[in-house]
Image (spheres, grey):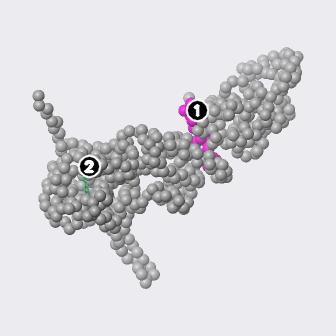
Amino acid sequence: MAKRQFKAESKRLLEMMINSIYSQKEIFLRELISNASDAIDKIYYKALTDESLTFQQDQYYIKVTADKENRTLTISDTGIGMTKEELENNLGIIAKSGSLAFKSENEMKDGQEIIGQFGVGFYSAFMVADVVTVITKALGSDEAFKWESKGADGYTIKTCEKDHVGTDIIIKVKENTEEETYDEYLEEHRLSSIIKKYSDFIRYPVKMDITEQKHKEGTENEYEEVTEEQVVNSMVPIWRKNKSELTDEDYENFYKEKHYGFDKPLKHIHISVDGAVRYQSILYIPEQMPYDYYSKEFEKGLELYSNGVLIMEKCADLVPDYFSFVKGMVDSEDLSLNISREMLQHDRQLKLIAKNIKKKIKSQLLSLLKDDREKYEKFYNAFGRQLKYGVYSDFGSNKDLLQDLLMFYSSTEKKLVTIDEYVSRMPEEQKYIYYASGESNERIEKLPQTERLTDKGYEILYFTDEVDEFAIKMLMNYNDKEFKSVASGDLGIEEEAEQNQAETEQKNNEAMFMYMKDVLKGQVKDIKVSTRLKRHPVCLSTDGEVSIEMEKILKSMPD
Ligand code: ADP
Ligand code: MG
């Protein structure tokens, strides 16, 4: 039996597609500029292989012009243009990508930057257009053509005049409706900010005529309107530049420009990886905690670019929660995008990148700790709690990654110390890493439970953050040294003679203890003679997993 072809109601399909795949209308400009950039890339590529062609960088640009009176927006490029046949194929067949075909015909693989692949981006123009007109002249052709469409009704192609090789896309911008505004796509500033947002790193200049109030020369307070052609995009992304060319100031400016924060970053991390997935990234450790950091409103994530084009503003999957304070961006040419290019098809590459980034952040924090303790402490005071949550969450699976980044106040050093520092100072006979929990360092200092340890010269870590003890319970030990609360029944320092004496005392005073237990019925489990007190008559201790401090926290939590 002969196979029959599917038929599609192309009119409906186009409408459905245009209105459902993109989350924001403004994306249309990103799509058209990406196409223009691809068209220039193709000439560039041809010039590489065809000696009769030369590629002079300054002849290649994209120009965006708004005409408010006629309600038209024009995106012109000096790219490769389209023949009549190409117009029919590429703009007449939905989901046909001339760019994808170009890549495979020319066996382009690595390092090529052509963006198009799905053959749908162009139609996004109909989100804001009543009519789209394409005037184009292909490289090596004398004829120019005009393609025109109102969207659903199909298109026409006629011959026309055009001086230079290249393409003009003319959008007749829709009238405002009650629900939607379209006027904004004729406003210079709105347009230039959309270009900056999505297409800042398109490799060719995106120009616009920008009108500004300028100080009139020779006058004091007189201004005049001056219209000048300006390049709107920065073209070369800072992350593609060589680290050695960049100064701290360049990185700080980028941080500001991108509005990552109002502070000055404590540290930047510039990564360029050429491995299983290729990517570049610039990350920042902020100095200050964002005001909403510990609130529900805070959204973690890094900017995600695919080949210099912004895909996602906050890609949460790129950073784990415990590093959620990290700001910055990732650009990769190896992402498999979904059709709207707002999401990813597979997250395999993303997972690899995220894993890699996680390790880099850790190693950079460690080197900050080593090289600039003051800065590290500043960082730790702002974000240390997040690291401790990180140790505690996911059943402690991140403890190896995070334990060396933790710091606690030390009873002997009177400052923040790392666990590693603590352990390296431990006297040989000391069995445990001791810690004491309490509301503040001052209060902990006065705890009777710390007396014996302090007398023995042992260092105690002070836990004043609610999460501290929970995190340590997940760590369990560090370099085979177990953590021990000063409040636990057995501190591991009691000597045999002392133990024996305590047992005797216990027996001799059995009656008194019975009486005391009776008085405190239901409030204590046991009362014992203690060997660890010096200046205080009594202290509380626990023998279970949950300490008194933890119990307080657990009790205060809503069910
Ligand atoms: P994609 O860019 O994913 O291929 P589009 O729908 O954006 O899909 O564009 C379809 C095709 O139309 C492109 O692949 C390209 O061949 C052609 N095209 C679109 N815009 C231009 C342009 N400005 N210059 C030359 N060709 C273009
Ligand atoms: Mg495209």
Up-down: is 333 above or below 168?
above
Residue 236 placement, left or right of 323:
left
Callout 2 amino acid: Glu
Q: Residue furthest left?
A: 1
Q: Is mark 2 within 8 Å of ligand 1?
A: no
Which quadrant is home to the N terminus?
top left
Q: Position of residue 337 (x, y in %)?
A: 35, 44
Q: Position of residue 336 (x, y in %)?
A: 36, 43
Q: Assess disc 1: are there few (<14), some (14-19) or many (≥20) residues with their C-alpha within 10 Å of its C-alpha.
A: some
Identity of the residue drawn at 86% across and 24% down: 498
In reply to whether residue 203 is colored magenta, the answer given is no
In reply to whether residue 396 is colored magenta, the answer given is yes
Q: Assess disc 2: are there few (<14), some (14-19) or many (≥20) residues with their C-alpha within 10 Å of its C-alpha.
A: few
Residue 137 placement, left or right of 64:
left
Find out whether the residues at labels 1 and 2 contact each other: C-beta distance under 8 Å: no
Number of the label disc, if any, that sits on residue 288: none
- Corner quadrant of residue 234: bottom left
Q: CA distance from mark 1 to mark 2?
A: 51 Å
Identity of the residue drawn at 29% across and 65% down: 54
Number of the label disc, if any, that sits on residue 396: 1
Number of the label disc, if any, that sits on residue 105: 2
Residue range in magenta is 376-398
Q: Position of residue 149 (x, y in %)?
A: 18, 54
Q: Position of residue 442 (x, y in %)?
A: 75, 42
Closer to us: 438 or 518: 438
| Residue 190 visible here | no
